[in-house]
Image (cartoon, coloured by chain):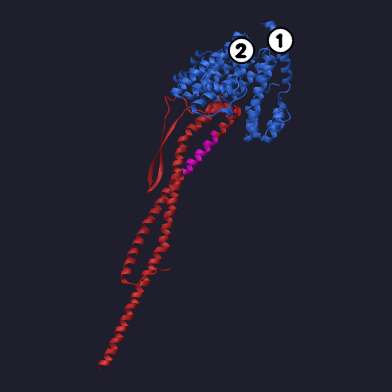
Chain colours: A blue, B red
Amino acid sequence: MRGAKTEYAYAVARVRALETGLLDRSKIERMVEAKDADEALKVLGETPYAPAVGQLQSVYEYEVILRQEIAAVRELFRKISPHPELTDLFFLRYDVLNLKLLIKGKLLGQEVGEFLVPAGTIPPEKLAAAVANSNWKELPSELAAAARRAEESLAEEADPQLVDTLLDRAYYAHLTRVLGERGEEFLRTLVSLQVDLTNIKTFIRVRHVAGGDAVRVRELLPRFFLPGGRLTLDYFLAQAEEPLTAFADRLAKDSIGPVVGEGVAFWQREKSLTRYEKLADDFLLAYVKKSRLIAFGAEPLVAYLWAKENEIKLIRIILVGKINGLPAAEIRERLRDVYA
Amino acid sequence: MEIRVNPTRMELNRLKRRLAMAQRGHKLLKDKRDELMRQFLVLVKKNKELREEVEERLAGAFRKFMLARAVMSAEAVEEAIMYPKERLEVKLGRQNIMSVHAPKLTWEKVSRETESIYPYGFAETSAELDDSISTLAELLPRLLELAEVEKAVMLLAAEIERTRRRVNALEYVMIPQLASTVRYITMKLDENERASLTRLMKVKDIVRAKGV
């Protein structure tokens, strides 16, 4: 397997060239400093986003550009990657999102077409038809099973949370399994770190919902817990009673230690996970950046996708903030690091 | 302006009865108006407090929602909240405030073994959404209460206006009119009486002059 990775040479070179087009810190800073949303959009118009920005009627349609951007990255990967099915794993997230929308929409009898993201591995129309007929053949096995269960249980109990939790868990189970099978250690670790960080966030949120009742934490957490992380469910359950600071201290030596430590401290001060979410995103981005040392493989491609998603998040935070007149300081508080 | 009537004793009695009735009605309506006003002020005060509280907390919730919206994509937010988990059953009843029929809302949660109000999974959603959703959930009963109070205030205001119009109509139109008509008839009758008296005296004079 290892030797064959030179087939990625062209794809990696393409992506490296594209990386230089990502927004750098000074562009982001100029957008934050812009006096209103239109001006921020104008800054965006001076970047590779220019053609898309030119087509916009107003700043409120920014969401359109952002959607197209991810779909374009997938198009590109399909063309240049020798193993597009590997990068497709990371686009499957958008299929999962579409799937959730469609299943909920089906049970509510509501049209959701306008919200479907065209960035998934299955075209939205095809997925819509599949959901309408409850035909899950196109989906990976884990997702198919989860979708079937979600639809069945929702029909009798009407707990919409179940759709989300079942599909989220299935997605990460699938991701972990395939990456493990293919021996993609770097990406496997990336996913497990992401899962750990998400599970820790979930742990904090569940504790908050339960209001200090450890029994309820033990009851709720398994529902939301994602598989594929290094920290097991039992690890969390064993600490349901302990204060969060003790939980954070125990992780202090781990690579995610600083994120958890600072995030938990901020949570206890402000009862807000804003800081934690930002730090977790930054941490993963920093991890992804290490792929710069990898010359051949799918890693740089995934890294580019990650950087692009991060950039889209940045643009969204700035534009939503500007449209709603949020002060620059509060926008900055939420801004993630920049990949470039 | 007076009412055109025949200046007869029967008419006079009728008008006097009407006048007495109008005065009694006026007094009763005035009492009603005062009491309505009192209740109205209480409700208005409550309404103001409720509205201020609701508006302040709603603004907070929307702000948090906006922040959640900033870190999540539009589709993800839509997906997260499109299918509500909580269900509230609102029953519309009636309450009687000074014979004004105001709506009375009663509500109850129709949710199963509810453990958390969030209709979404935690993996793909920002924690900022939680705050916004929980504030909105806490706020809903207050919103219903506000709706009830505000409608009652509106109905009471309309009723007060109607009552005040009636009181004024009685006080400044009906009662003066009736009073002046009564006076007119009394004077007319007195006049007639004096006329017939003088006529009689005159006749008597003539008879006496002829008879001599």
Would you place residue A20 above or below residue B44 in this image?
Answer: above
Instruction: Determine the chain carrying the residue at label 1.
Output: A
Taking the image as shown, residue A274 lies to the left or right of residue B194, namely right
Task: Estimate the x, y position of residue B130 in percent, counting from the top left.
Answer: 53, 27
Sequence order check, earlier mark of 1 and 2: 1
**Identity of the amino acid at label 1?**
Glu
Location of the N terminus of chain A (image quadrant): top right
**Residue shown at the point (72%, 20%) measured from the top left:** A18
| Circles 1 and 2 on the same subunit | yes
Return the residue at label 2.
A189
Give how far across and how far down residue A61 sits, in percent.
64, 32
Q: Which residue is mark 1?
A: A7
Tell me, yes or no, if residue A221 can be seen here: no
The alpha-carbon separation of the residues under discs 1 and 2 comes to 23 Å
**Compared with residue A333, is residue A261 higher up or lower down, i.e. above or below?**
above
Can you tell which quarter of the image residue A257 is in?
A: top right
